[in-house]
Image (spheres, helix red, strand yellow):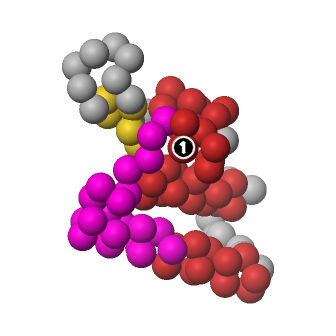
């Protein structure tokens, strides 16, 4: 099965993958700058989308402490990778 992409789709895909690579690099070099609180993740990526990624097992949040009400943090790079995977599924499964 051949995958057919328009030129602009391929260009956008390359741009998005380079942004994802930069986010992964930042995650490795400065891990604290990669972390988002749950509230920040919801505002930047959308609450429904983040919850969908968590329920699908694509991203996982880590609590700062052991308490139930300690802030949950997400990786910006993981959220971006999940969004790109979602886009790729839409392109591949046309």
Q: Is residue 47 left or right of residue 62?
A: right
Residue farthest toward the top in the current orientation of the protein: 68
Q: Is residue 27 left or right of residue 8?
A: left
Mark 1 residue crowding within 10 angstroms, few (<14) / some (14–19) / many (20+): many
Q: Quadrant of residue 2?
A: bottom right
**Residue at (45%, 54%) from the top-left corner?**
76
**Residue nearest the viewer, comparing 32 with 93:** 32
Q: Main secondary structure of the magenta part?
A: helix
Residue 16 drawn at (x, y percent): 58, 72
Q: Is residue 69 visible?
A: yes
For the N terminus, which image quadrant? Answer: bottom right
Q: Is residue 55 magenta?
A: no
Q: Which residue is mark 1?
A: 41
Q: How many marks?
A: 1
**Residue at (38%, 50%) from the top-left corner?**
35
Q: Is residue 25 magenta?
A: yes
- Give the magenta range: 19-38
**Residue nearest the viewer, comparing 3 with 36:** 36
Q: Is residue 49 visible?
A: no
């Amino acid at each position: 099965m051949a995958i057919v992409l328009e030129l602009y789709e391929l260009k956008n895909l390359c741009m998005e993958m380079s942004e994802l690579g930069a986010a992964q690099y930042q995650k490795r070099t400065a891990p604290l700058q990669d972390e988002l609180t749950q509230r920040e993740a919801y505002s930047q990526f959308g609450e429904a989308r983040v919850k969908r990624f968590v329920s699908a097992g694509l991203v996982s949040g880590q609590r700062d402490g052991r308490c139930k009400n300690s802030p949950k943090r997400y990786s910006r790079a993981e959220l971006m990778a999940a969004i790109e995977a979602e886009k790729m599924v839409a392109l591949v499964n046309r």
